Image: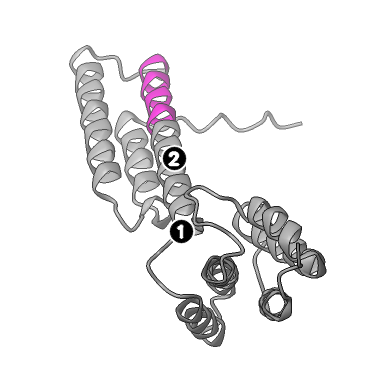
Amino acid sequence: MAPPPPPLTPTADEARGLAARELAQAAYRTREPGVLEQLGRWLLERLDDLVGLLTAQRAGGAGGVLVVLALVVVVVVVVRRRLGRAARTAHAGAASLDDTGLTAADHRRRAEDHADDGRFDDAVREWMRALVRGLEERDVLAGRPGRTAGEAAREASAVLPGAADALADAARCFDETVYGGRSADAGSVARMRAADRAVGEQRVAAG
């Protein structure tokens, strides 16, 4: 029985190349890449320094390569974590229900444009903004920064009990799309559109 092949042991230069290729992946590109690019360059410079030190000390053996590979792992982990925080921050901003200065009708038009273009996630977000903004325009809800979709649904249901189911479904669809990692589709958009219509048809309960 033939012995197993020896493990692949990259050289220091190959290890450095692994880090460079990892950082060049499209997954690391954001709409505002400046900070991540600077971080990536800084880490690769440190990797260059370490490779140079290992070479100068003739530490290119297995132990030296393992140190370089360990730094590659550090490069990848740090940049991925930084990217994750940036993505979460951008995502939170995109999902905000705070007053954008647009009317409910504006948000409805944007929702329909997104849906026509197949951007269903964006359409769901705009429909929720339209719904909440419409409630504010009717004085059902007072404008309040930081209000979540669930909070808006519960607060509005107390005033529009006949729309409670529609409000709850809209908030659920929004949360599934924005926070639950579930991609929206045409059916999701139809749910949001129907909820907005149902809420708009309900009159404020007397007393």
Q: Could you classify mark 1 by the number of other residues whose Cα lies within 10 Å: few (under 14), some (14-19), or many (20 or more)?
A: few
Q: Closer to the camera, 139 or 130?
A: 139
Secondary structure mostly seen in the magenta stretch: helix
- Say what amino acid the circle numbered 2 marks: Arg
Mark 2 lies on residue: 85
Give the numbered dot on residue 94: 1
Q: Closer to the camera, 128 or 119?
A: 128
- Say what amino acid the circle numbered 1 marks: Ala
Residue drawn at (38%, 40%), measured in percent from left and top? 18
> Which residue is outermost to the bottom?
116
Find residue 12 and report its horizontal and vertical position in percent.
32, 29
> Which residue is outermost to the front?
207
Taking 142 as reference, is 191 left or right? right
Secondary structure under tag 1 reads helix
Vertical relation: 199 (above or below) 93: below
Vertical relation: 36 (above or below) 49: below
Find residue 60 and report its horizontal and vertical position in percent.
31, 20
Residue drawn at (39%, 53%), measured in percent from left and top? 25
